[in-house]
Amino acid sequence: MAKQPAKGRKTPAKPKKTTDEAPAPAESVVASGPVVDAIPAEVYPKAAEPAEKPAPTPPPVQEPKPAPIAETSQPASPAPAKQTGFLPLALGGLVAGVIGFAVATFTAPQPDDSLANRLASQATAISSLQDQIANRTDPDLSGIEAALDDL
């Protein structure tokens, strides 16, 4: 952050640059000879000669200037600036809050019970399968076990 000059002290004026002085040439600039065009003149298109001279244009007509308007004795006073208070701002904020609350309340999504219904139906299916497994009787494998023992 730049410091500000102390009160009572004036900053020195910057010297003005004069345009009378020509800028010093750069040291890297070397004087060169004339430039020769490597493209022959036959390549350039020839300028078309106008067949007729255009008619001279008449000088433009100057419009008369309107007379200046006389100044009034009273200078125009600027319109007083309107000052807004806190009340319009507070009422605007209150209205915006009410509108936001109403939109959020009336456009709330309806609850989706389809997931809960699917979970309940799957739970009943699982419990019925568990009951079937618990009530199942084991098959009689004594004949197969005896055949294996004989081997």
Image (spheres, grey):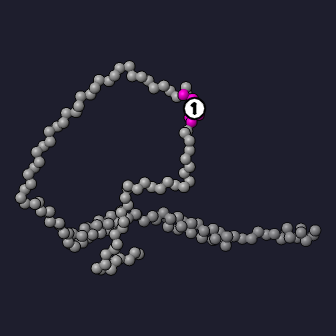
Q: Is residue 107 above or below residue 43?
A: below
Q: Specify few, some or many for label 1: CA neighbours under 10 Å numbering under 14, 14-19, or 20 or more.
A: few
State left or right for residue 82 relative to residue 17. Answer: left
| Whether residue 90 is visible | yes
Q: Is residue 109 left or right of residue 57?
A: right
Instruction: Give the residue drawn at x 35%, y 20%.
Output: 52
For the N terminus, the quadrant is: bottom left
x then y, percent, for residue 150: 93, 69
99 relative to 75 in the view: left or right: right
Q: Examine the image and state in which quarter residue 99 appears.
A: bottom left
Residue drawn at 34 percent across, 77 percent down? 5
Rendered position, 54 above or below 33: above
Q: Amino acid at mark 1?
A: Ile
Residue 98 appears in the figure: no
- The residue that appears at 56% across and 69% down in the rendered structure is 123
Q: Which residue is mark 1?
A: 39
Q: How many marks?
A: 1
Q: Is residue 14 above or below residue 40?
A: below
Which residue, as the protein is rendered here, is positioned at the far top? 51
| Residue 129 image offset from top left, x and y in percent | 63, 68
Which image quadrant: the C terminus? bottom right
Region in magenta: 36-41
Which of the 4 image quarters holds residue 17?
A: bottom left
State the image coordinates of residue 69 (x, y, percent, origin top left): 10, 49
User: Where residue 24 appears, x then y in whole percent?
Assistant: 47, 56
Residue 5 lies in magenta, yes or no? no
Name which residue lies at 50% across and 27% down: 45
